[in-house]
Every structure is written in C-alpha cells, then in structure tokens.
Image: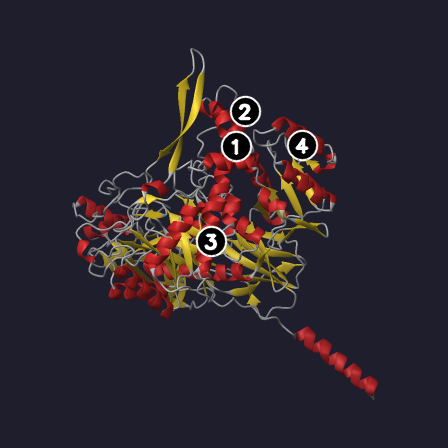
Amino acid sequence: MRTHLLFFCLVVFVLVTACEKQEVKWPEATQTSKPWTRWWWMDCAVDSANISRELAELAEAGIGGVEITPIYGVEGEEERTIEFLSPEFTDVLRFTIEEAGRLGMGVDLPPGSGWRCGGPFVPAEKGLWNLKIEEKKAGKDASTYEVNAVQNGDKVKRPSQGGEGLAIDTYNKEITEWYLSEFWKRLNVPEGKLRCFFHDSFEYTGDFTLSFEEEFKTRRGYDLNEVLHLLANDSIEPELTARVKSDYRETLADLVLESFIQPMTEWANSHGSLNRNQAHGSPGNLLDLYEACDIPETEFFRQLAEGEPRLFIQKFASSAAHVSGKQLVSSESFTWLDEHWKVTPAEMLRATNRFFLAGINHMFFHGTCYSPEDAEWPGWLFYASSQMNNRNPLWREMPVLFQYIGRVQSMLQQASPENNVLVYWPYYDVAAAEGKLFKHLAVGSPTEWFYSQPIAGLSKRLMNAGYSFDYISDKQIGVCKAENGAVLTSGNKSYEAIVVPATRYIPLETMKQLIALQKSGTKVYFDERLPQSVPGYANWKEREAELVSLNKELDADWVGDALQLLNTGKVAGENDLAEKGFYFLKMKDAEEDVYLVFNCQNKRLDEWVELNAVAKEYVLMDPMSGSITKAKSKGQKLRLQLEPEESVFIRCVTKKADVKAHSYFNPDGKKTDIDVRWHLSFWEGGPIYPGDIDISQLQSWTEVGDPETSRFAGTVRYSANFDWDGESTAWIDLGKVYDCARISVNDKDFGTSLGPVFLWEIDNLKPGPNRIVVEVSNVAANRIRDLDQRGVNWKKFKDINFVDIDYKPFDASDWPVQKAGILGPVLMYSE
C-alpha cells in the first residue's frame, strides 16, 4: 500500500510540474527606475506655488526626481530673485524637498551654483593656479627655467545671484574640505534629505597647485625643476618630454582623485547623501575617478548619427560601476541633441538606446527649466537643453518615452550585468601624448584620447564579434584576484578574460599583476603585441629593461589577434546576434539569462538567432508597449524581428511561460492603400488655432488651408473613415510622420509611436466602414521661427542669454518651415 501511495504521489508531482507555467512580469517601478531631470532655477526666482505645480506635472508625467541646479537669471525678474545659499534659499529648498517627497520624488543638488565648486566666500589664495615656466638667459646659448605659479582666475560658470565667485583649487585636499564644510553650513538642510550631491563634468582649467612641486617629487621620485627645460621646449628631446608630461599629468590625476573627488564622496556620505560625479573632462584616469563616487555619470554631447552606435566613451562610467560593484550608472541626457525646438522624439529615443547600450541605467534629462505659470510662451529657458518641459508641444507624448525608460531601467537595476571580458585602458599612452599639460578628456568631439588609440579598434572588433566587455584601469587591475580560471574584481564581479590592446607604456606593477593572474589560471591576452615600455622619466631605462625581461615570461600563445585568442580560449561571444546586425546587453536575473537587444540600423531586422543560453522558452518583453509574449523558436533558435530603434528584452525562461504567442509583422502580406479624405482639427497648441481642414492628399499641414498652419506647434487630430473587407487583425503603417503619433481605430486606443517607424498591429477591424483617428504632435520650431520673425522679445536671459548649437546668438527667423503631420503613404498589411 505504501509503495502504491508513493508511486501515486510521484505521478501527481510529475503531472503538476509538467503543467506548471512560469509567470513573467516587469519589475515594480521605483523612484530610481523612473527617469529624472535637471531642473534649472534661474536666479532661484522660485515660489512655493509654482514649485508645487511643476513638481506635480513632472511626477504625473513619470519623472522620478529632480536635480536642482541654480543658474543665472531672467532680465526684468529681479524682484523674484532669491540669493543662493541665503536663509530664503534654504527655506525654499527645504519646501521643495518636502514637496518632492510627498509626490514620491527625490532631490539632488550640486555643491555650488552653476558649474564648478566656488562662490563669493572663496578667497584668492584658495583659487586655481596655472604653471608658468619662466625662462632666464644664463649666457649666449644657455637658459635656466623656473617654476612660476599664476592664479588663473577661474570663476563659477553660469552662476545664480549669490553664487558668483572664484572656483576652488581642486588639487588641494584642505581647500576642498574647507569649501565643502563652508557650503554645508550655508546650505543648512537636515542630513539625509538630499539624495545626492552632484558634480558636473570637470570644467576647471588649473594645471598647478602651490604644493605641486612637493607632491611631484614625492610621487614621481625626482625634482620637477630638473626637467623644466623639457616642458619649455618639447621639440628638443620628444621622448623625454613625453615621459615628463606623463609624470606631470599622472600627478594631476592623483591629486584630482585624492584631493577632490574622494573627499567629496566622503563629505556627501558623512551627511547622509551620495555623490554623483561626471569624471569626464578631468585631467586624470577616468575609470578611477568614476569609481571614486557613488553614482558615476556620463553624457553624450550634441547630435548622434543614425546607424551604428558610437558609445565606447560612455562605457567608461558603466565599466567603473560594474568593476567596483555599484548598482547605478547615470547619464546627462540630450545635451544639444539638436538645435532648440528641433529635437524629435525619434532623436530622443535613439540617444536613449545608445545610453542603455553603454550600460546606463539611471537617466537624467538635460533638462527642465523652472518657469512660473505667468511667463508667456515659451517661458524661461536654458541655452543647451532639449526642453523637457510642458511648454514643448511634444510633452503630451513624453510619458510614453518615460515609461519606456522606466521599464528598461527597472530591469537593468534589478539584474546583474554579464560582461565576460575586461579590456585594459592604456592610460599612460594618453598621459604621454603631445599637447598642453592639462589633458582634457572630454566626451564630445574630438575624443582623440580614445579614438586615435588602438583600444578603439579593439573595442569595435570585440563588439562586432558579440563580446560584452568592460574597461579596467591599472589601479583596478591591481586589486583583482584569480578565481577558478576567471578574474574577480573589487566589486566581486567575475570575468573570463583580460585583453590588453596594443600598448606602448604600461607600469611594471600592472604587468607583474597580469603575469601573476595568468599564472594563477586567468586568461590574459595581448592584442597584436606586448607593451613596449614603461611610463615616466625616473630610471626609465632600467625599468624598461625589467619590462623586457617580464615579457619573456609570457608564452607566445598569449599574444596575437585578440578575437582568435579568445576563441581558442573558449571565451564565447554572442556572435550570432552580432553577425545578424543586433546590438545587445546581457544580464542575469533570478538565475535566468536576460538579453536587451536593439536594432540600431535604418532597416528592419528579421532573423533567426541562436543565443549562448539554454532555455525552455524565449519570452519577449517589449519595454515600449509593456507587452510580454512568447517568441517563435526552433530548438535553441528564436525569431527576432525589430524595427529601426526598437528594442526588446529576451528572457530565457526555464519553464513554459504563461504568455501568448508573439505576433510578427509580415511585410509580404496583402497591402492596401488607405487613400481617403482626412479631416484635420487643430487640437491643442499655438500660437492660434487655425480652422479645420479637409484634405484628399496627405501633405505637411504647414502647406494647406489656413496660412496660420505654417506657425502652429502642437497636436493635430486626423480622422477618416475607410472600408475594410479583410480579417479583423491587420497592421497599419502611417509612412512618414512629423513628429510623433497616437492612433485609435474604432474608438480603441493603440498607443503612441515616437518614431522613426509608425507601425501598429490593429485587432478590432470590422467588415465595412471603420474609423481611424491619429493625433500628431510636432516640434515647436515653426512657432519659435514665427516669434523671431515678428521680433518678439522672448530671449531675455542673463549671462550667456540664448545661443544656438554653435554657441552663436540664436535666431530662428531665417529657418525654413519644418514639415508637420502625416505625409504617408498610409498602408494596411494583412495575411
């Protein structure tokens, strides 16, 4: 009887297990998974009523928090001004923090006004310095050189009233700590109320500090005065000059890290807050500087070309986070993405996707300018923004973008990145390069410090072969450990291999560590050749000889083409995804493999792909619509179909998933041209509402009917009736649309497309008459053009006032009229 009972229980268990289906759902949205925005306060001319209104509008749209940045003011609004760090400023800041908290939002703040740490309380002796080498003739053909420290006069950039003054010396720890202490006393907010303190990209220009000679000698082992002649004339002995420059720059790098960023992080943490820092622009090793804060932040600057993504610079921030075990990596997003009021939703989506591909999971918009309700359109504006505010006619559709970002970030913040290769960044090749002593490592063009180096070509080859990788610095390699054939970083992150690009200079300590890791079982590969020399000036020939000796310890099998070496070492990339044109991130969530896959091309991709992951089924999670479906699969292959700039999560589930089958678009099906008469109603926007228009041929609404349509910016409702004799389900393609569209058919809402493709699956068609309504929103370029043609004075801002993308005075009066609306053709596809 007992045997029968056991057998019965076993049968029941097998049947239940066989029938059990896995539930797949999106992670819960959090304050951090939602996008945030930089909120400029112009001369802090804010009030509680408008603060409450704007925060409520942002929260309702789907914004998770704000970074308040006080900047210059508005002409004629001086009565509203609140002096930065005054008691009134403290009061309004405290109110904002409480109001944001009530709405479930967070608040970040820079430790200063505008850009750069500094202000009116910074005395001259605590400001920035530059090195000036003074030449003195010692005879007919001889000269001596002396160090001369010159105050460079750098001030806070774009400050609000009360924030003006000298920038601090960023290479002096005592000055940094003094400034932050003074700032905290004047700020006077309770500890822990500000989520983060934020430091923008390094825009200080000092290259010296009064203790520099002492620091240089202690760190580099020789007297700077002995080699001033090499810095004064770098054409005499270029090799030696490069070595001295490398030492000089390395000393600046040490001081920026130890005297500025690390103390800032410690200070923020001591007051219950985090430190969010943009390391780029700094004269130092960006990977170490990004790691030295709590939330590393990168940015794109200016336009992004369509097609293949260019995102390696942005991976420096995410690499530092991954290597050191940090959860969040942020981005300053959409800075000068295009000219004012011309930034389209498709451009925003393209930039968003590039950030995600670079490993970003905490986006900040650049941004939103506070503007009182009584300010006439276009309100108060910042000069380098994509205008993420409610005066932008695209605002009504921005929640779709915000939801998309939120879904992606919720998954990226929950899952663990699964990059399997580390790529060494040869910082000392950059430190020894020609040019000024202050080596500005920017994210914008030109980025010769990266793209002129062999690491750029290696990065592209790895990406095109389907490898997921992070960059790693000398300091970070120095604390790595070998474990079961892999390498373990300080953040307890495991990688299968380290790849060293073709490198000229490498520190002996780094090379010894790489050899030690290799001897302990870690795969360490050198692309093309071994490093040639050591950095720096002191005893360099002896150290170079030691490097040559170390190189002989390496087996020739570890040197060559990196891709071949990885393949031989059985370090696998997702080559099938890459070969078929997809870009991706790979991660682990609850022990399941998850991929975030993008189509960054200008054409549809429809391929059967094989992943390096075992799964019972492949579940597709669409972050734009939120839909969850099951992919068509054959064994370990699945069908993946993505439109340009479309993305999808692939979840490799271990049980059958309780979701419906995915619906694929068939471009070869029956095609019907919806050639009907459209009725156009100007729904919301301005400056005025033109009369309704009926058109029989689709064209830009700026070219038909009322002449007022050429300056209208807002939303126009297109409606039409059409006959249908096919199945109830079909696909509709609106063709060319300027600039985004929301569609409904037979009173059912099918959502908004941000572009660049305007394609929906419609499932409620009926025989005979059907009704379609499309609401199209355009950019505000035509309305701004109209203001400038009529000479309306809306550009009334202090400091830089208002400039165009080339930093020249902004004037839209000679712009051509931008196209707007549906241009079609509108096509229906059915089986």
Q: Which residue is mark 3?
A: 265
Q: Which secondary structure lies at badge 2?
A: helix
Give the residue type that dot 4 points to. Answer: Leu
User: Reading the chain from its start, which is encountered first: label 1 or label 3?
Assistant: 1
Residue bearing the label numbered 2: 240
Q: Pointer 2: residues within 10 angstroms few (<14), some, or many (20+)?
A: some
What whole-number distance in Å separates the C-alpha atoms at marks 1 and 4? 18 Å
Q: What is the x, y in percent for residue 524? A: 68, 42
Q: Is residue 147 left or right of residue 496?
A: left
Q: Amino acid at mark 2?
A: Leu
What residue does disc 1 label?
A: 246
In percent of width and height, residue 440 lies at 44, 37
Q: Nearer the viewer, residue 443 or 191?
A: 191
Distance from the alpha carbon under mark 1 to that under mark 2: 10 Å
Q: Which mark is residue 547?
A: 4
Q: At label 3, which amino acid type do we have?
A: Thr
Task: Report the coloring of the rendering.
Answer: secondary structure
C-beta proximity under 8 Å, tags 1 and 2: no
Q: Quadrant of residue 145?
A: top left
Q: Is residue 560 visible?
A: yes
Task: Give the alpha-carbon distance from disc 3 to disc 4, as whole Å.
Answer: 36 Å
Find the distance from the CA under tag 1 to the CA under tag 3: 27 Å
Residues at marks 1 and 3 touching, judged by CB atoms closer than 8 Å: no
Amino acid carrying mark 1 in the image: Ser
